């Protein structure tokens, strides 16, 4: 046969060395934020059932774990508190009261690991007896009344040493409101990574197990976005940009790679994506059953999120990824 093949893309795939030369995207441990869970107590390391390899720590065991995590080169963690049911109330009072185990833990983490960038979540759900991200009245989630609580929470977390605050509540106007509250208290250097485009997703299930924070009634569809929408994502992102966010986040990641790409093309701020609990659980479950190669699926997943345009990935795989590189 005499058909002339002029362009042979396979030439650029013929060896490991050449493949490395032409590789367009890479994942580095520098890109990763490791979400971790803390609870009150001592000597606790309790595995989250739906998230194999992920634990709820008490402060003492968390500090031990952080030694390992930081030695592996992880530079940022996002610390979520698990509150006992009897500490929760309508107003999420524990989220900003001085001397709570969580705020004290933030201080301790910062004292012990001053180089570590410490991120926190700003939303009412782990502290709310209604399990919602905002204040509930007569079955409705109130927007403007929630902002006051979020601002108190944000200032308390900043005071405790948080470097990056992650408003994950999806109330309107919260980034600007929190920015103003932080600046008024002198925390002009504390960053805001806004959960700008957060969808009402089934993939948060395991996280809500970890924190016992599932909504007690209804769902989150009046504040989290409809998974069908991407043009609306531009509105949310533009508002957060104007209100002073330092990073824009898309959450979840895998079912929303097009949204990540759209944001990356339209905004010059660093784009983050949250590879959420359900996305982690799916790969873990399949790997445990021997249905796929967990490490390869992890690497491919992280790479796809970077390729879509996220510079930063919040992922429960952070430690495993770092261990593989080490
Ligand atoms: N507002 C709280 C919050 N912050 C991060 C997640 C989910 C993270 C994950 O699934 O890994 C949630 C849950 C939710 O909105 O219901």
Image (tube, rainbow, N blue to C red):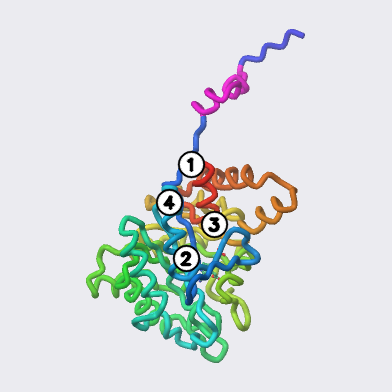
Does residue 301 appear in the picture of this structure?
yes
Q: Nearest to the eye among marks 2 and 3: give it.
A: 2
What is the C-alpha distance between the residues marked 2 and 3?
18 Å
Residue 183, magenta (yes or no) = no
Magenta range = 7-22
Q: Which residue is mark 1?
A: 326
Q: Is residue 130 left or right of residue 3?
A: left
Q: Nearest to the eye among marks 3 and 1: give it.
A: 1
Q: Which residue is mark 2?
A: 61
Mark 3 or 1 closer to N-term?
3
Q: Residues within 10 Å of mark 1 (few under 14, many from 20)?
A: few
Say which element carries label 1. loop
Q: Which mark is residue 316?
A: 3
Q: Nearer the viewer, residue 142 or 64?
A: 64
Q: Is residue 212 left or right of residue 173?
A: right
- Mark count: 4
């Amino acid at each position: 046969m005499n058909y002339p093949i002029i362009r042979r893309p396979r030439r650029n795939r013929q060896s490991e060395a050449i493949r490395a030369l032409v590789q367009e995207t890479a994942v580095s441990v520098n890109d990763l934020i490791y979400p971790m869970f803390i609870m009150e107590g001592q000597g606790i390391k309790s595995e989250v059932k739906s998230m194999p390899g992920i634990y709820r720590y008490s402060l003492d065991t968390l500090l031990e774990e952080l030694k390992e995590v930081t030695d592996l080169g992880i530079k940022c963690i996002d610390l979520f508190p698990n509150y006992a049911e009897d500490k929760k109330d309508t107003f999420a009072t524990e989220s900003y009261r001085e001397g709570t185990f969580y705020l004290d833990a933030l201080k301790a983490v910062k004292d012990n690991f001053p180089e570590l960038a410490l991120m926190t979540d700003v939303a009412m759900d782990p502290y709310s007896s209604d399990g919602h991200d905002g204040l509930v009245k007569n079955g409705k989630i109130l927007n403007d009344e929630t902002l006051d609580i979020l601002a108190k929470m944000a200032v308390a977390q900043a005071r405790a040493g948080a470097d990056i605050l992650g408003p994950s509540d999806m109330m309107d106007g919260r980034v600007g409101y929190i920015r103003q509250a932080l600046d008024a208290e002198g925390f002009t250097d504390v960053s805001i990574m806004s959960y700008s485009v957060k969808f009402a997703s089934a993939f948060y299930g395991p996280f809500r197990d970890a924190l016992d924070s599932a909504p007690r009634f209804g769902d989150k569809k009046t504040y989290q976005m409809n998974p069908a929408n991407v043009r609306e994502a531009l509105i949310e992102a533009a508002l957060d940009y104007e209100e002073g966010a330092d990073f824009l986040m898309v959450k979840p990641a895998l079912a929303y790679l097009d949204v990540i790409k759209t944001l990356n093309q339209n905004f010059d701020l660093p784009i983050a994506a949250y590879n959420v609990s359900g996305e982690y659980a799916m790969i873990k479950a399949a790997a445990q059953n021997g249905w796929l190669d967990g490490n390869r699926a992890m690497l491919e997943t992280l790479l796809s999120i970077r390729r879509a345009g996220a510079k930063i990935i919040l992922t429960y795989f952070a430690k495993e990824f770092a261990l593989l590189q080490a």
